[in-house]
Amino acid sequence: MRDFAQVAGHETISQTLADSALTRLEVDSIGLDLQDRRYLLMIADIYKGGPVGVETLAAGLSEPRDTIEEVIEPYLIQLGLVARTARGRCLNDRAWHHLGLPVPQQGAVQNGLFDAES
């Protein structure tokens, strides 16, 4: 923020300046950046909310596993957007709402896999 203020010729950082700087840095209203949103959207779009393993996410995002576990996930878990389960990472309802996507029905990912044909 200091750099943005200095470039803009301001001696203090105002709310307007901070909002403008965060918008330019693509940080949203709850503090998620582009990398965080890519992580959430990958789980939502490709894996229908999860569960999905960290190695799969790391490969899909072209990020090392350590970056996923130590940089991206902690804040998302703290906000209640993502849950780490024994089967993998899953999106919580709050993540779906934040992304502006409908929350899938419970078990919707698995529906149809083992249903008997009528």
Image (cartoon, helix red, strand yellow):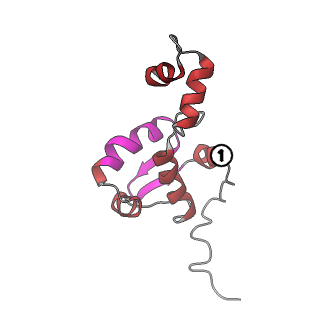
Please give left or right for residue 20 compared with residue 35 in the image.
Answer: right
Percent coordinates x, y for residue 31 in the rendering = 52, 34
Name the residue located 57 percent from the left edge and 80 percent from the top edge. Answer: 114
Location of mark 1 (residue): 97
At label 1, which amino acid type do we have? His
Name the residue located 45 percent from the left edge and 40 percent from the top edge. Answer: 77
- Tell me if mark 1 has few (under 14), some (14-19) or many (20+) residues whose alpha carbon lies within 10 angstroms of its own: few
Does the magenta portion include 90?
Answer: yes
Q: Which residues are magenta?
A: 67-91
Please give left or right for residue 34 compared with residue 16 in the image.
Answer: left
Above or below 72: residue 58: below
Please give left or right for residue 79 compared with residue 56 in the image.
Answer: right
Dot 1: what SS?
helix
Percent coordinates x, y for residue 12 in the rendering = 52, 11
Specify the farthest residue to the bottom. Answer: 118
Percent coordinates x, y for residue 82 in the rendering = 49, 46
Above or below 11: residue 1: below
- Quarter of the image for residue 94 reads top right
Above or below 29: residue 4: above
> Which of these two is toward me, 22 or 29?
22
**Residue 75 seen anywhere in this rendered image of the structure:** yes
Name the residue located 62 percent from the left edge and 81 percent from the top edge. Answer: 115
